[in-house]
Amino acid sequence: MTTVSGMTLIGAGLGSVAQQAGYEPLLPGLIILLPLLGFVINGVLALQAGSRSAARVRAGEEGTGPSGSAADRTLPTWIGPGVVGLAFLLTLVNFFRMLGVEVHEPVVRSYWTWMATGGLVLDAAIQLDALSMIMMLVITGVGFLIHVFSVGYMKEDPGYPRYFAYLNLFVFFMLVLVMGASFPMMFVGWEGVGLCSYLLIGFWFKDRAKADAGKKAFIVNRVGDFGFLVAMFILFTTLGTLDYQGVFEAAPEAFAYGGAAITAVALFFLLGAVGKSAQIPLYVWLPDAMAGPTPVSALIHAATMVTAGVYLVARSSVLFALSPAGSAAVAAVGALTALFAATIALQQYDIKKVLAYSTVSQLGFMFLAVGAGAYAAGVFHLMTHAFFKALLFLGAGAVIHSMHHALHATHKDWDAQDMRNMGGIRRYMPVTWLTMWVATLAIAGIWPFAGFFSKDEIIWASGVAARGSMGSLYTLLWAMALAAAVLTAIYMTRMMVLTFHGRNRTGEEEERHLHEAPLNMTLPLGILAVLSVVGGWVNVPGSIRESVFGGFGVLPMSDWLDRWLEPVVGDAQAILLTQLGPVAETAPVGGGHVLWGGIATVVAASVVLLTARAVASRPTVPALEEGEPQRGIRKILYNKWYVDELYDRIIVQPILRVSRWFWKVVDQLVIDGTVNAVGSVTRGVGWFGSLFQTGQVNTYAFILTLGVLAVLAALVL
Amino acid sequence: MLVEALVVSALLFVIGTFGVLVRRNAIIMFLCIELQLNAANLSFVALSRHLGIDGQIFVFFVMTVAAAEAAVGLAIIISIFRHYQTVNVDNFNLLKW
C-alpha cells in the first residue's frame, strides 16, 4: 500500500524536480528507539510473568490456565505491535519527505562517538538513503502485520510477553542493521538479529530438538560472521575508515579493479552474506529454524533477517562492482542455491519445510541478481519476496494453528505440519486459501503478480550479464535460474494442492474442528495479498509497460524503484559500465523483455496447471500410513541430498572427537592432574609434619632444647 | 669469683633443663623451670659487677615474670588436677593439631 501511493506521488513529483531544497528527516532515531522501548516494557512484563508462574509452580498450583491471567496479555498485545506500528508510521512520514527530493547524498545523523581507538573513530550514526528507506519500510511494515498476526497466533502461549519482547528486540536490531552508517554499525545489528533469531527459534526451549535448532542457527552463522569481520579488517587496513561514505568514496582509487585485495573483501563479505542469508554451503540452519513459532519464520526467516546478506551486497555494491570475480562468485552461489534448494522443496511434506527451502531458493535468486550487477533487481525481489513469502508463512501458520486445534480437540497424536495429514482445507479456511494462492501465483512468476516482475527481471539481468565478460558462466547461471523458476512453480503448486484441495485426510472427528483464523490473523493476510499483487508494479521496464503486460500503459506501473535506488547503486553501475562497456539488452538466445515475459508467464501457468492435475490425481494418504520414500531420486530429495549427514560426518563428528580428546586427555589428565597433584603434595607434606606434633609437652621441650643447642652450636663453631 | 658464679649458674640451668625433659610430674617440671630462671638470674647478677647495673635491674623483671607465671601455671595445674585427678603430663596430649 505504501508503494502504490508512493508511485503516484513520485509520478507527480518528478515533474517538478528539486523544487525542495533537500531532505529533512523527522526523528529518525525514534524509529530505532520505539522497538527498543517495546522490548524493555515487554521484557519487564515477561520477567514478572515468569516469576509469577514460578511462584505458582512452587505453590503446587501447576497448570492453572495456559498463561496465567488475561491481564498478562493485555499490555504486550498493545505495546508489541504498537511500537512497530508507530515506527512504521514514522518511516512512512520520512519516506514521503524523501519522495520528490533528489537525494544523491545520504543523510547521516551522528549521535555520539561510539569508539575512538588509534586511527579508528566510529560514530553511533544512522544513514538514511533510498536503500535503507526501502528496507525500513519492509521491516516495519511487514513486521507490523506479522506482529498483529502474532497476537492471534500466540494467544494461548504461556510465553506471550516474552515472545513480543524478543520480536520487538529483533525489529530494533534489524533497523540498526539497515540504518547504521558504517560497517561496524551494520555488524551490531547483524549480530543482534542473529541473537534474536536464536532466541526465537528456541522459543519453546523445553523441546530439545527446538533448542538444538536454535544452537545450530547460531553456530552456523558464526562462520559467516567471521567472514564479515575479516572483510572489515581488510577494508580498515587499506582505507583507514569504515563509514559507508568514506569507504565507497575511497574504494575506487584505493583498490585496483579486479585486484586481489578487493576480491578478498568481496569474497569474505560473501561468506558473511552466505551465512546470514542461508546460501550454499551454510544454508543448513534455515530449514531447522522452522522450529520457531510460524510468525517468527515469516518475519525473521523469510521477510527480513535472511535478506540481510542481499542488503549487504547491495549496500557494498561499489566494492562488488570492483571485483568481477567476487560478483561472479555471488551470482554462482545464488544460482546454485536457487536450483538446489528448489529440488529439495519438491519432496518435503512438512508445510513449513517446503516454505523454508523455497525461501533459500528465492534468496538464491536475489544473490544471482546482485551478483550479476542488477542491484536494484535484487532489492526489488527482496521487497516482493518479503510480501508474498511472509503471506505464505502466515497462511501456513493459520493452517497449522487450525490443524493444531483440530488434532488437540480429539487428542490425536498426528503431525500438525505434515501436508499428508491435511487436504481439503479450502472448505474451512477460504480466506487463507485464497490469499495463499495469490502468493503462490506471485512466487511462481505469473502475470500480474509481483513475482512475475521481480523474478523475470533477475533472470533477465543474468541473461544480460551473459553478454558481458564471463559470458559462458552467466549463461549457465541463467539456465539454472530458469530451471529453478520452473521448479518453484511445481513445488508451490504441490504444496497448495496437498494442503487445500482434494479429500480431507485429518479424520472425520477432527475435520469438524477445523476453522478459519480470526480477523486479526486474516487481515494481515489480506493486506499482504494486495501487496503481493501490486508490489511488483513499482519496477516495470518501459517496454513491458507499453505491452499487453502493462495494459498498454493503462495500469499504474512505473520503473520507480530503479530510479529511486539510482543514487545508491549508481556508483557501482558506473564502474560496471566503464569496465565492461554497454551490454546488449537481449537474452542470451535473443528476444526482448516482452517476448521472454510472455514465455515466462505461459510456462509458469502451464506448469502450475499440470502440477495441480498431477498431484491431485495421485492418491495421498496420511503421513503415518505412507512412511518414507524408499528408493531413487525421491528418497534422496526427501533426505535433502544428505547434506546434513555429510556435514555431520566431515565437520561435526571430527570436532566432537577432537573436543572429546581435549576433554579426556588435556583437561582431565593434564590440567586437572596438575592441579590435583599440587593439592596432594601439600597434603602429604602436611601429614609428614604432623607426625612431629605429638601433643606431649616433654617432646616439645626436647625439640626446643635441641633447636637451641643447634643454634648455639652454629654460633660457636 | 665470676667464673665460679657462672659455673654454678650453668650447673643449675642444666639440672633445670634435664628436669623439664625427663620428669613427668607437672609440679616438678614447673619447679625445674624456676630453677632455669634463677640460673639465668645468677648469671645476670654475677655479670652486672663488670658490665653495669642493667643485669641487676633485669633480674627484678625476671622475678616479676616468674611470680606471675607461677600464679597462672599453678592455677592451670590445679584445675587440671581437679579434672583428671593426676598431674602426670603423659596423660595430656591435647596440645596438637
Image: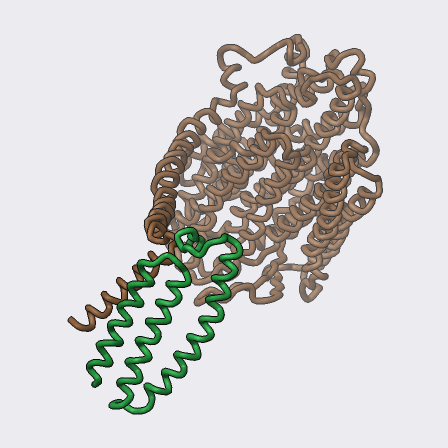
The colour style of the image is by chain
Name the spot of residue A458 as percent of width and height, x first. 56, 36
Name the spot of residue A14 as percent of width and height, x first. 69, 55
Residue A701 shown left or right of residue A205 in the figure: left
Residue A417 shown left or right of residue A698 in the figure: right
State the residue at coordinates (56%, 48%): A190
The answer to whether any part of residue A568 appears in the image is yes
Name the spot of residue A257 as percent of width and height, x first. 39, 52
State the residue at coordinates (69%, 30%): A392
Q: Quadrant of residue A239?
A: bottom left
State the residue at coordinates (59%, 43%): A379
Q: Is residue A174 above or below residue A651?
A: below
In the image, A142 versus A415, the foreground residue is A415
Numbered label tally: 0
Q: Is residue B8 above or below residue A354?
A: below
Residue A142 shown left or right of residue A234 in the figure: right
Residue A454 shown left or right of residue A688 in the figure: right
Name the spot of residue A697 as percent of width and height, x first. 38, 58
Q: Colour of chain A?
A: brown
State the residue at coordinates (53%, 35%): A216
Q: Is residue A194 above or below residue A293?
A: below
Q: Quadrant of residue A16?
A: bottom right
Q: Residue furthest left?
A: A717
Which quadrant: the N terminus of chain A?
top right
Which quadrant: the C terminus of chain A?
bottom left
In the image, A31 versus A223, the foreground residue is A223
Chain identity for the colour green used in the image? B
